[in-house]
Image: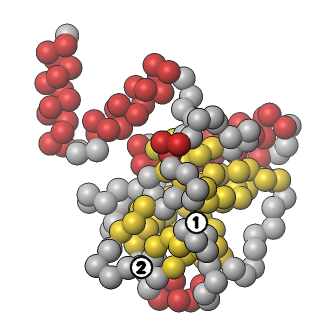
Amino acid sequence: MVGDRFLVLETSRFLDPGLNDRINFLQEWINNGTPQVFWVSGFFFPQAFMTGTLQNFARRYKIAVDLLSFDYIIKDDMTHKDVTAKPEDGVFIYGIYMEGCKWDYEKHILAESDPKKLFVELPLLHLLPVASRKVPETGIYQFPVYKVLSRLGTLSTTGHSTNFVRWVELPTDMPEDKWIKAGVAGFLALRY
């Protein structure tokens, strides 16, 4: 059995370089229970995970799930390795890569990217469900997150894009047009 598992893992390495990482992430979850922080890139369908997060909150507080949306809290004072406990509500996620910008750790906002650095990792993100939340009209960039670099996708039978994951509100002191024109976006995988 061990030999067969090794053969499958070795073969899968050539099919999808991230497959072994995904298997290990999911196996850790099975073996050790719900993680304190989630590697969002490890999900095959991250939209379902995020919807499930809203549903869990709705059940816990007996709120209609349709009234919920996420508040996006950047935890730039720590990394996923520093997390010692789950948040009271919502989830911590990591594994989103930004293109066309960087994170300013002093001002806690989006900033122009450094020369010759195409991709940088978004800091740890706390997705916090909030009921009847008003979306800020200024001071944010609606940051599109995709599974892969192509930014292309088709509408699947579930009604979701096969590539687009969601919009994430990131704080900025620049007009949103600047980031749109720069093509700033997030990606869960950089290998494709």
The amino acid on which the numbered mark 2 sits, given as a three-letter code, is Ser
Residue at (54% x, 32% y) in the render: 35
Residue 163 visible within the image: no
Q: Position of residue 49 (x, y in %)?
A: 56, 43
**Residue 65 appears left or right of 156:** right
Residue position marked by numbered label 2 in the rendering: 113
Residue 127 vs residue 113, the one in the foreground: 113
Give percent across and percent down for residue 120.
Answer: 39, 66
- Looking at the image, residue 148 lies above or below residue 56: below
Residue 112 point in image, percent of width and height: 46, 82
**Which residue corresponds to the image point at 15% horizontal and 31% vertical from the top-left?**
10
Q: Which residue is mark 1?
A: 167
Is any atom of residue 14 visible in this view? yes
Q: Is residue 7 above or below residue 40?
A: above
Q: Secondary structure at mark 1?
A: strand
Q: Does residue 11 sit above or below 170 in this rendering?
A: above
Which quadrant of the rendered structure holds the N terminus?
top left
173 relative to 113 in the view: left or right: right
Counting other residues with Cα less than 10 Å from the Cα at mark 1, is it few (<14), some (14-19), or many (20 or more)? some
Q: How is the image coloured?
A: secondary structure
Q: Amino acid at mark 1?
A: Trp
Residue 47 lies, with reference to residue 21, above or below; the image says: below
